[in-house]
Image (cartoon, rainbow, N blue to C red):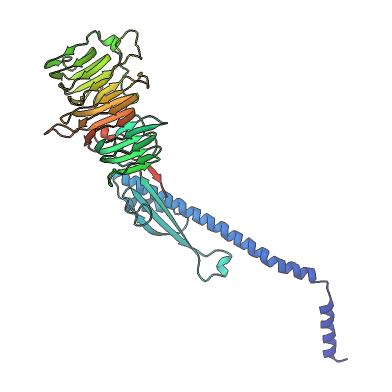
Amino acid sequence: MTRRQTLRRKIASLLRHTGGNTLALVGMAMIPMVGTIGLGVDVAQWVVWKRQLHTAADLGALAGARALADGHPVKINVERSLAQNDLRAFDTDAIESAPTVGPFKDDDDKVRVVLSTSQPLPFSGMFLKASPKITVEAIAENAKTVPNCVITLDKSGTGVSITGSSTVDMNCGLASNSDFDATTSDYLKAGALSAVGTVTQGANITGDTKVNDGINEVSDPFASKLPMPNAQSSCSPNSYPLIKSSVTIGPTAGGTICYQGLQINDGVVTLRPGTYLIGASGISVSAKATLQGTGVTLIFTNTQTPFNSGKIGSFWANGSATINLSAPTSGTYAGVLMYQDPRTPAKNNGLKITGNSDSSFEGAIYAPTVEVTMIGNSDISGAAGIETPCFQIVALFATFTGNTSVSNNCPGGGGAAAFGGDGTIRLVS
């Protein structure tokens, strides 16, 4: 037998041998198992990288929105944040203080940050010609850059209602801690309409009016800052004059005076500067009368002893009456024009504000437990030649209805116009 024949027989015998089959099958089975494990490692690595990139983008966008609110350079602050959160090498594809694409395009209250990275994966990198690219986007907003001049404190219903044929033109924001009804059939322009819940929009809101749903709750700017009214100990509330002619009334030297109420039927009634404690009969102003005063705070309370929360005064004026009132600029009630006793039950009618086209209200109306209503044919826009007033409302509810026309020009950062103007920074995408 030749050597060639012997080799052939050995090879044939080896091929007929079955002892190594199991090992071969195990070896082949390991191929997909190793691939699965390798892909699993790649996916986990991909998820970690993407999460790290998202974290950096989110923090960068928030830093940009904070800079936007504070009036600081957006790009510099975003880049500073990205440098501090460089958890994964990345490229900065975009930093925009008004997004150029997407649902927030051209919104200058938004900051958009886009980051990307492309690195080889441990397993699949052996089979890919190019590394896959991860791109993430984050958008943050300064949700309330406009200071508020109207704040409603109710948390369950519709805090602000602008309905009927109301015309509202305010260079400031209106904010509700619940929902907001802005369905007036007339003209509505404001710095912003904001709600913790939802702003129901009508067709007559101007395009430059910001609308913000889902804002953070706005705090009561007067909470714990104003003393509880105390008419019982500070004066003797026995008077309820019926005024039919022009007269000047009130305290001396900016002091305090109490009235059971004021009935103003005719003439020009001038209030001296000071604090007025008004009892259960409240203040009423008829159509032919004028009520005016500078440096005045009207506090609607109860003058009885013991205190009776069921008999607290309020304000009412005929739509043809002329009302020109301004709040003091210093002292305990600085900036407060009307103050409804916080012990007033919510079921009470609240304050009804109205007046003719020559009327103006300068200062805040604070009614934390009741509704303030701009009603009837009121036109609160300031008399001819008088600077348009800065009129503020902080109340449980605020309603603008009928043919109300309110023109307001609260300067940003001053007085009550600063309510809520610090901005709410949040991610929106």
Residue extending farthest to the right is 1
Residue 6 vertical placement versus 94 (above, below): below
Q: Is residue 306 left or right of residue 258?
A: right
Q: Is residue 136 left or right of residue 189?
A: right
Residue at 14%, 19% (x, y): give it.
270
Q: Which is nearer the eye, 318 or 391?
A: 318
Residue 69 vertical placement versus 406 (above, below): below
What is the count of numbered marks?
0
Residue 212 position within the rendered picture, expressed as x and y whole percent measured from the top left? 36, 42
Q: Quadrant of residue 286?
A: top left
Q: Which is nearer the eye, 324 or 257?
A: 324
Residue 80 vertical placement versus 364 (above, below): below
Residue 33 position within the rendered picture, expressed as x and y whole percent measured from the top left? 67, 63
Residue 274 position within the rendered picture, expressed as x and y whole percent measured from the top left? 20, 18
Residue 178 vertical placement versus 123 (above, below): above
Quadrant in which the N terminus is drawn = bottom right
Q: Is residue 90 left or right of residue 402?
A: right
Q: Quadrant of residue 223?
A: top left
Residue 97 position within the rendered picture, expressed as x and y whole percent measured from the top left? 33, 52
